[in-house]
Amino acid sequence: MYKEEQVMSGLRELLNKMAWLNKFKMEDALKEYKSSEVHYIECIGKNVDSNVTKLAESLYMTRGAISKMTKKLMEKGLIESYQKPDNKKEIYFRLTEQGLRIYKVHEELHKSFQERDKAVFEQISDEQFDSVISFVEKYCRHLDEEIKKMGIDNKPD
């Protein structure tokens, strides 16, 4: 059990340090926006034809929370809704020019964080990367199974 606790404690510490360190540049560059808004913008920017269901699955949020935030982002002029000609029932979201600017700033910040941390990753062998990737994939599959047991089958709400 000790190694499990060491891994989980280490992962928490790692993610907390990254978030804390990245927070200052993020808040400075994107000061008019809440981090939750930026995360929605990132998700919409990375996923073509984002709709409420896709966003809920990607962000592990309820569809109600997604609807609330997309309405807010539309009011701010950061995203717009659209429908496909062959499907008038479904509503999709895409970034506006202003939303795209935020998305690009956010992506550039992530690139700068990767550059900052490059020295660590250059010291990692392919075998070590493969081990970490394998662990993360196994753990994700396990958590997916736990979510299914709860009866929500990877779909928040």
Image (cartoon, helix red, strand yellow):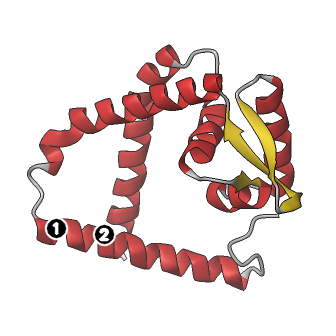
Q: SS at mark 2?
A: helix
Q: Quadrant of residue 75?
A: top right
Q: SS at mark 1?
A: helix
Q: Is residue 116 above or below residue 90?
A: above
Residue 3 seen by the camera: no
> What distance separates the C-alpha of mark 1 from that of mark 2?
9 Å
Q: Which is more toward the observer, 8 or 60?
A: 60
Q: Residue at x 38, y 29 (%)?
A: 108
Q: Residue at x 82, y 56 (%)?
A: 85
Question: Callout 2: 10 Å neighbours few (<14), some, many (20+)?
Answer: few
Left or right, residue 57 beside residue 45: right
Name the residue that disc number 1 marks. Answer: 128
Name the residue that disc number 2 marks. Answer: 133
Q: Which is more toward the observer, 30 or 144?
A: 30
* Sequence order check, earlier mark of 1 and 2: 1
**Image quadrant containing the C terminus:** bottom right
Q: Residue furthest right?
A: 89
- Three-letter code for the amino acid on which mark 2 is drawn: Ile
Please tell me the numbered disc located at residue 32. none
Q: Residue at x 78, y 81 (%)?
A: 151
**Image quadrant containing the N terminus:** bottom left
Residue 87 x, y percent position in the rendering: 85, 62
Q: Residue at x 77, y 22 (%)?
A: 76
Q: Is residue 149 above or below residue 152?
A: below
- Three-letter code for the amino acid on which mark 1 is drawn: Gln
Left or right, residue 29 beside residue 11: right
Q: Is residue 54 above or below residue 107?
A: below
Q: Which is more toward the observer, 144 or 86?
A: 86
Residue 95 x, y percent position in the rendering: 65, 35
Residue 51 x, y percent position in the rendering: 75, 54
Residue 15 x, y percent position in the rendering: 41, 46
